Image (tube, grey):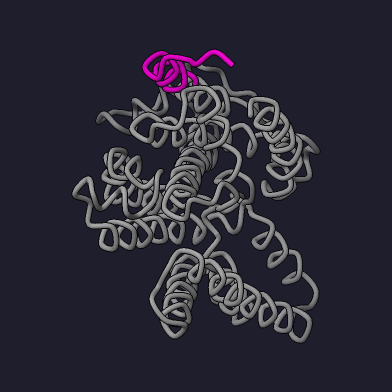
Amino acid sequence: MARVSPLALGSALAIALLVSITVAVTIGPADIRFDEVWRSIASHLVIGVSPLSELRDGIVWQLRLPRVLTAAAVGAGLALSGAVMQAITRNPLADPYLLGLSSGAALGAVSVLLLGAAVLLPLAAFIGALLALTLTLLLAGSLGAITPSRTVLAGIAVSALASAITSFVIFWSVTGDSYREVLSWLLGSLSGARWPAVGITMVAIIVIGIPVMLTGRLLDSFAFGDVQAASLGVNVSATRWGLLAASALVTGAMVSVSGSIGFVGLILPHAVRLLVGPGHRALLPLSALLGAVFLVWADTLARTLFDPREIPVGIVTAMIGAPIFAFLLTRRKSST
């Protein structure tokens, strides 16, 4: 397959993201025009009074825009973390949840939902993800030197344990309306995303994600193994675990506001790699951009496909992601 210029693809994805955010805000039961979106944004960013009615301005600024921006940030963060995980573990099937993060976050989230403290959900989910990561690293260390394969196996064990505890808690305690709330979060949902969620995800992208995007050269050195990377002057251990921790923090921040959304961090790095090649200097930022565009539209489908009912966005990403991943696997096989 002919390769695409990374600059051209990046420019196209950046434009597509801006257009996607604008269009997605206009889609919904209330008919909002393009110009109304930008007039509402301008009135809030620049001192002035919104020209829209209070109801229409609230729909744009308080409901749809923060949800769409959160979807973009979560998609970017998960795709970026997936690309990093695949590089440092040299495992093409790695995804951001490999180390038990989603299961730990789910256990924390379900706990506070059952306690009636939904306002603490993002914090509890983030703490749950970090505790799962800590337990994974402790377990991997107890087996000897911490290697990628041992870390992955430890992550699988921790994930299974956290999932089992979560299932037990749900079976024992969840009744009535709380069951739908818990199930929606477990399947991945952005229905409750407001400006605090935008703040959490954007800070994670800016403070951690952007520096990670600048490590493309370091990740390229891992392609031929640790010995080759070390011969190029890379501190293999410090680089691997630093990037692993950064990816885990980004993933934890994303999961804390969206729940577990599958396939984004698995398939999109493969799609970008198919277009521009394996070089991580282009792969990391392009994966983030494609992830943002993808999840904006996946969430738009989730909230409008069966209007007035809404389905968890994780269902949509799985329905789209599974056949795409199968297609990518066939293309990969035919090219080898």
Q: Does residue 62 lie above or below 150 as drawn?
A: above
Total tally of numbered discs in the picture: 0
Q: Is residue 298 left or right of residue 315?
A: left
Q: Residue at x 60, y 50 (%)?
A: 93
Q: Which residues are magenta?
A: 1-16
Q: Main secondary structure of the magenta part?
A: helix
Q: Does residue 14 lie above or below 185 as drawn?
A: above
Q: Residue at x 47, y 55 (%)?
A: 89
Locate residue 283, reporting x and y percent: 42, 33
Q: Residue at x 43, y 72 (%)?
A: 130
Locate residue 110, reporting x and y percent: 62, 74
Residue 136 part of the magenta segment: no
The image quadrant that residue 271 belongs to is top right
Q: Does residue 61 lie above or below 2 as drawn?
A: below
Locate residue 150, reporting x and y percent: 50, 71
Which of 158 and 251 lies nearest the eye of the viewer?
A: 158
Q: Is residue 279 left or right of residue 265?
A: left
Q: Residue at x 72, y 71 (%)?
A: 178
The image quadrant that residue 5 belongs to is top left
Return the residue found at the far left. Answer: 233
Which of 107 and 331 lies nearest the eye of the viewer?
A: 331
Instruction: Locate the C terminus and report the quarter of the image it occupies.
Output: top right
Instruction: Locate the N terminus and report the quarter of the image it occupies.
Output: top right
Locate residue 22, reporting x and y percent: 50, 23
Which of 240 and 127 lies nearest the eye of the viewer?
A: 240
Q: Is residue 9 left or right of residue 296?
A: left
Residue 3 part of the magenta segment: yes
